[in-house]
Amino acid sequence: MKDFGFDGNCDKFPVGMAYVPWQQFDKICDNLEEGFRIGTIFPELHKPFTGRRCVKC
């Protein structure tokens, strides 16, 4: 992996800003036990990790 030479001094970097849109929750899991097991009762937020790497186009 390429070393970009970051020395740990964050004073020279600007403060970051993020855009986070409001989430609309339309559904709640029918089986709440299953929802608590997978970590969310909102199906829209259930995004299991697949273990794949990103590939550049």
Image: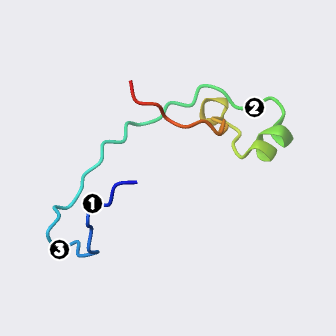
Q: Earlier in the sequence, mark 2 or mark 1?
A: 1
Front label number (2 vs 1): 1
Where residue 30 sits in the image (x, y, percent)? 80, 29
Q: Which residue is mark 3?
A: 11
Kind of residue at badge 3? Asp
| Label 1 environment density (alpha carbons within 10 Å; few <14, some 14–19, many ≥20) | few
Question: How packed is label 3: few (under 14 Cα within 10 Å), some, or many (20 or more)?
Answer: few
In the picture, the quarter occupied by the N terminus is bottom left
**Left or right: 31, with 45 as reference point:** right
- For residue 4, the mark is 1
Which three-letter amino acid code belongs to the residue tagged 1? Phe
Secondary structure of the residue carrying tag 3 is loop
For the residue pair 51 and 28, the one nearer the viewer reads as: 51
Q: Amino acid at mark 2?
A: Cys
Q: CA distance from mark 3 to mark 1?
A: 17 Å
Q: Position of residue 39 (x, y in %)?
A: 72, 46
The residue shown at (24%, 56%) is 16
Q: Pick whichever, 46 or 22, lies toward us.
A: 46
* Secondary structure state at the residue bearing disc 1: loop
Q: CA distance from mark 3 to mark 2?
A: 45 Å
